[in-house]
Image (cartoon, rainbow, N blue to C red):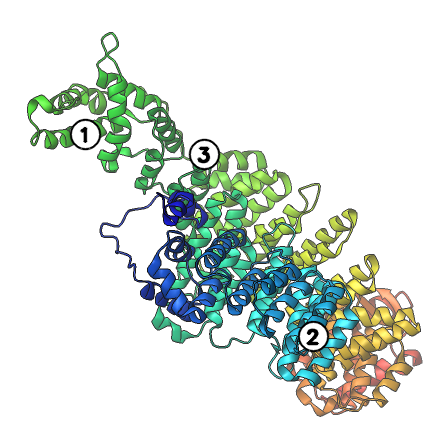
């Protein structure tokens, strides 16, 4: 008669099925010689699980499934009794283990384990107590499971279990996730009937429910009331719910808005719990377009920058990284992974890098297990490489090693896919093809000798040819012996002759075959010493030695009829082709022979790159860059001396932006990481400032031009901002205080998309890049509209900007815009209404920005008017250094201007000078006792001298166009003459 335990065992899933459930056994591995014996003591098992959860906040899936669930399913009486005796301690523990702590398997698999555990608890101990139900509801919410709270409460009450306040917290959370506002109200009434009042948790759930439905005003009202009703903790919970709901809706604008509200001004940290922030990141990844989280990774980094790291944060972070990797949210996992660099140095004693290597290894195995596209894997590997392998970093993460290892060891993979992965990774690991032993797992992965020979041929075409340099025994076992056994003598050919011909047909040279068979003869001779003669297998050692003797002369001594060796291309020939602009010859030389050994890269790389970018296909450009990359490790690490500069890489990105019919900003961003990996020393440097500025302006102009044809959307704008942040992060560009790129951004958006999107973009620039210059574009737009709505918008910009910048900086920019638009009365009135002084340095910054925006057509009237306003109304002269710097800037501009203003008449000059304006600048500042420095004196003298020569040419007798005498009243009585006389007296 069968017992209940026999029935349970008969319905129990097999170990193989459960191994697949927890992702165990997908990879080949070395079996431990002495595997640690697992204990069967329930107290030890449960105590270890409890300790793991306390220390690490996470636990492995196979521990939960094999050490708990299967033990209960097998009818382990000791285990059941142990849980029953301390049910209040152990039941919530083992149920909670199926939620967030089970971070290395997917949510669907967690739910499957939870269902089996719950069924077993119901069978073994009857209806679980209320704390068991509460734990289950919490885990269901953590795993994002669809469940009916009303039905579950009904089942709970039918079982005679009375819900408590913790039960309602979880039930209400589930109702809130569905956005069922009416259901939430009904549940609150049910709570009231049972004597439970609305608390901070229920208020937070209400905020979530209204937010998820898009009722933002009601949600914001509840957030404001939370602080007064429920204290600081209530406010924290309410804002956390609002942030999570915005992420669940995929409403990034709402999310950014709430995050900005939650910033604590004194610490620039978010007034949110780490749990809410990490859960928000999870929802953002879940709602991302492709599920990888690429478009939200930049926002995630900003959130983490502002997160308070309390006790246990690193353990939660580790758990979340595993969770994101497991669910294929690779880009958000990378953003979280990068945050591990912030961990305190005190953890160095605990080998912080060990955690990092573990996580990168898990990321690699997950990418290969899911057989992700090669371009995605390469992009992720490039990002990991850039993040952790910088010059000053002590860490060295070799992700490609992990990827290749996972490729070789994964069991269920098609041979073609395995070889394709191998081909993609091997150039990063073994460029010179010296580590031939790493190819052996490929050949052992196939059982058919013909497949192994095909692998051998492909490896040979990849550059692996020295097969005699590795251990011969694996070759004998996988290829040589099976090939010998299958072969038959053919006419006058022996089996060994036929074997050598087969190997030759698969790319193995005669010399390598001879050396391999010689080593095989030594192995066979050693084996034969220990085996009786009648038990020895063919080929015998003497046969192998005989074959080697017979073919020695033919292999090593007989001269072979070989093709004429190609003459190496000399560098001078390549350089002459580049100088002549003959791209056909240059491309032919580099694709056939590579770069000559004596190449002067500093001399030739810029010209060759320019030729490729102008005339070659994108595929050839990409191949040329990959061929050039290995030499970058030999170049000078100084960015100013390396042949491939940062602005060269920007020109490559611009060329990429011209390629496809549909511009992909995401694709260009990914390729920027690859370029940084190919040329790690091509970073920004001071001397290359103007070239860099010129290139990045061209790059973004091209992107905007292409996107205008395709049509702007909120997503494309966000991608452009992320691309800009990526370039700054990779040190390909630097945004200096007077940059105009963000102004260009905002102007384009105002014209093409409208005020709202431009305003949102401006706030993103402020929060993520700390670039306030787009303020000028918004202020000018508001002033041009001249409506009640625009005046409100103007005040909003000024007040909103003051949350990121000083009030002084915002007012200085406002005044500069007013002067630039010739609204002098408004500027004067604004100055009179000021309640606090404007910092002279802010006046200087505003002047520089406005001049940078007019780099092609300088506005001398603006310069004089704004400088006069700053001196007269804003007390600029009180800061001698700032005043002298502004004077120096204006004189420098006069010395480099295109238009010469002569006696209030605009004349096109044949030189870049503005003599009269320079004199007026000197006169203006001298009235406020701002002295000229020596450098400015020399510059002013040069401007006056050039002005005099132009006057003789165009004005004065006898050759001047106007034919006026130098002592004419119109000349001697002019303002310029007065200032020159004043300058002579001072000198």
Residue at the spot 14% in from the left edge and 31% down from the top edge: 522
Task: Tell which of 816 and 70 is nearer to you.
Answer: 70
Label 2 sits on a secondary structure element that is: helix
Quadrant of image for the C terminus: bottom right
Number of the label disc, if any, that sits on residue 520: 1
> Residue 193 shows which numbered tag?
2
2 and 3 marks in contact (CB < 8 Å): no
Q: Using residue 978 as the reference point, say whether residue 25 is left or right of it.
A: left
How far separated are the C-alphas under marks 2 and 3? Answer: 62 Å
Please tell me which of labels 3 and 1 falls first in the chain. 3
Which corner quadrant holds the N terminus?
Answer: top left
* Residue 943 percent coordinates (x, y): 74, 74
Q: Which residue is mark 3?
A: 414
Q: Nearer the viewer, residue 295 or 39?
A: 39
Alpha carbons under labels 3 and 1: distance apart: 31 Å
Q: Is residue 161 above or below residue 648?
A: below
Q: Is residue 886 visible?
A: no
């Amino acid at each position: 008669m069968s017992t209940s335990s026999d029935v349970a065992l008969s319905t129990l899933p097999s170990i193989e099925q459960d191994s697949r459930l927890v992702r165990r056994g997908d990879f080949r591995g070395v079996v431990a010689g002495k595997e640690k014996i697992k204990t069967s003591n329930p107290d030890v098992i449960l105590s270890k699980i409890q300790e793991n959860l306390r220390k690490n906040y996470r636990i492995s899936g196979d521990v939960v499934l094999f050490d708990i669930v299967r033990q209960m399913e097998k009818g382990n009486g000791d285990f059941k009794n142990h849980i029953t005796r301390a049910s209040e301690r152990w039941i919530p523990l083992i149920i909670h283990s199926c939620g967030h702590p089970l971070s290395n398997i997917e949510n669907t698999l967690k739910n499957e384990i939870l269902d089996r555990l719950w069924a077993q608890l119901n069978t073994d101990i009857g209806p679980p107590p209320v704390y068991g139900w509460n734990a289950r509801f919490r885990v269901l919410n953590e795993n994002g499971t669809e469940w009916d709270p009303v039905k579950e409460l009904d089942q709970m009450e039918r079982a005679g279990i009375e819900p408590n306040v913790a039960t309602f917290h979880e039930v209400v959370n589930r109702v809130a996730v569905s956005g069922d506002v009416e259901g939430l109200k009904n549940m609150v009434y049910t709570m009231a009937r049972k004597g439970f009042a609305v608390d901070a948790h229920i208020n937070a759930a209400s905020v979530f429910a209204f937010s998820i439905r898009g009722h933002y005003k009601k949600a914001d009202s509840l957030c404001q009331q939370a602080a007064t009703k429920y204290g600081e903790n209530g406010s924290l919970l309410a804002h956390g719910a609002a942030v999570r709901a915005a992420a669940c809706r995929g409403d990034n604008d709402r999310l950014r808005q709430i995050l900005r509200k939650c910033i604590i001004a004194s610490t620039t940290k978010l007034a949110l719990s780490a749990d809410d922030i990490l859960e928000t990141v999870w929802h953002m990844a879940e709602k991302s377009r492709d599920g990888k989280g690429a478009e939200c990774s930049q926002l995630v980094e900003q959130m983490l920058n502002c997160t308070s790291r309390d006790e246990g944060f690193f353990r939660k972070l580790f758990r979340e990284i595993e969770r994101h990797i497991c669910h294929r949210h690779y880009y958000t996992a990378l953003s979280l992974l990068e945050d591990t660099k912030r961990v305190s140095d005190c953890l160095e004693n605990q080998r912080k890098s060990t955690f990092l290597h573990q996580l990168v290894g898990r990321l690699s195995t997950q990418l290969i297990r899911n057989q992700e596209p090669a371009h995605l894997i390469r992009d992720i590997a490039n990002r990991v490489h850039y993040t952790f392998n910088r010059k000053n970093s002590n860490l060295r993460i070799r992700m490609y090693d992990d990827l290749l290892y996972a490729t070789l060891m994964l069991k269920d993979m098609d041979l073609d896919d395995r070889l394709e992965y191998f081909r993609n990774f091997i150039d990063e690991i073994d460029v010179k093809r010296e580590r031939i032993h790493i190819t052996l797992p490929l050949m052992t992965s196939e059982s058919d000798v013909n497949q192994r020979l095909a692998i051998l041929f492909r490896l040979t075409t990849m550059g692996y040819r020295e097969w005699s340099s590795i251990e011969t025994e694996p070759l004998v076992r996988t290829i040589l012996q099976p090939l010998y056994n299958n072969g038959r003598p053919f006419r006058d050919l022996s089996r060994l002759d036929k074997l050598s011909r087969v190997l030759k047909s698969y790319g193995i040279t005669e010399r390598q075959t001879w050396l391999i068979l010689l080593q095989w003869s030594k192995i066979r001779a050693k084996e034969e010493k220990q085996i009786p003669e009648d038990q020895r297998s063919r080929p015998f050692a003497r046969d192998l030695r005989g074959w080697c003797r017979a073919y020695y002369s033919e292999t090593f001594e007989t001269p072979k009829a070989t093709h004429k060796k190609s003459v190496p291309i000399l560098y001078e020939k390549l350089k002459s082709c580049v100088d002549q602009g003959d791209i056909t010859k240059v491309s032919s030389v580099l694709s056939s022979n590579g770069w000559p050994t004596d190449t002067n890269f500093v001399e030739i790389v810029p010209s060759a790159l320019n030729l490729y970018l102008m005339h070659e296909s994108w595929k050839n450009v990409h191949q040329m860059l990959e061929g050039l990359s290995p030499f970058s490790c030999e170049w000078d690490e100084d960015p100013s001396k390396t042949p491939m500069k940062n602005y060269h890489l920007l020109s490559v990105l611009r060329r990429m932006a011209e390629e496809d019919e549909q511009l992909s900003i995401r694709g260009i961003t990914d390729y920027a990481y690859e370029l940084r990996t190919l040329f790690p020393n091509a970073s920004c440097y001071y001397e290359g400032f103007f070239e860099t500025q010129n290139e990045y302006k061209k790059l973004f102009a091209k992107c905007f031009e292409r996107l205008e044809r395709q049509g702007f959307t909120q997503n494309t704008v966000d991608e452009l901002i992320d691309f800009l942040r990526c370039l700054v992060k990779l040190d390909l560009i630097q945004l200096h205080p007077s940059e105009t790129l963000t102004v260009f951004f905002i102007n384009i958006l105002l014209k093409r998309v409208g005020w709202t999107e431009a305003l949102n973009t401006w706030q993103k620039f402020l929060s993520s890049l700390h670039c306030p210059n787009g303020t000028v574009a918004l202020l000018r737009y508001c002033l041009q509209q001249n409506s009640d709505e625009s005046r409100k918008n103007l005040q909003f910009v000024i007040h909103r900007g003051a949350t990121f910048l000083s009030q002084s900086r915002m007012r200085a920019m406002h005044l500069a815009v007013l002067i630039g638009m010739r609204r002098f009365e408004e500027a004067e009135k604004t100055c009179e209404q000021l309640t606090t002084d404007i910092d002279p340095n802010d006046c200087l910054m505003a002047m520089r920005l406005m001049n940078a925006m007019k780099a092609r057509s300088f506005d001398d009237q603006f310069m004089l008017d704004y400088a006069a306003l700053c001196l007269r109304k804003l007390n600029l002269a009180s800061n001698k250094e700032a005043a002298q710097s502004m004077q120096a800037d204006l004189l420098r501009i006069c010395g480099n201007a295109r238009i010469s203003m002569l006696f209030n008449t605009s004349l096109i000059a044949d030189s870049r000078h503005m003599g009269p304006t320079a004199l007026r600048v000197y006169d203006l500042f001298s009235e406020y006792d701002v002295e000229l420095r020596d450098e400015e004196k020399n510059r002013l003298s040069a401007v006056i001298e050039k002005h005099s020569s132009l006057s003789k040419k165009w004005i004065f007798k006898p050759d001047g166009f106007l034919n006026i005498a130098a002592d004419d009243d119109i000349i001697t009585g002019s303002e310029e003459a007065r200032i020159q006389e004043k300058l002579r007296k001072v000198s």
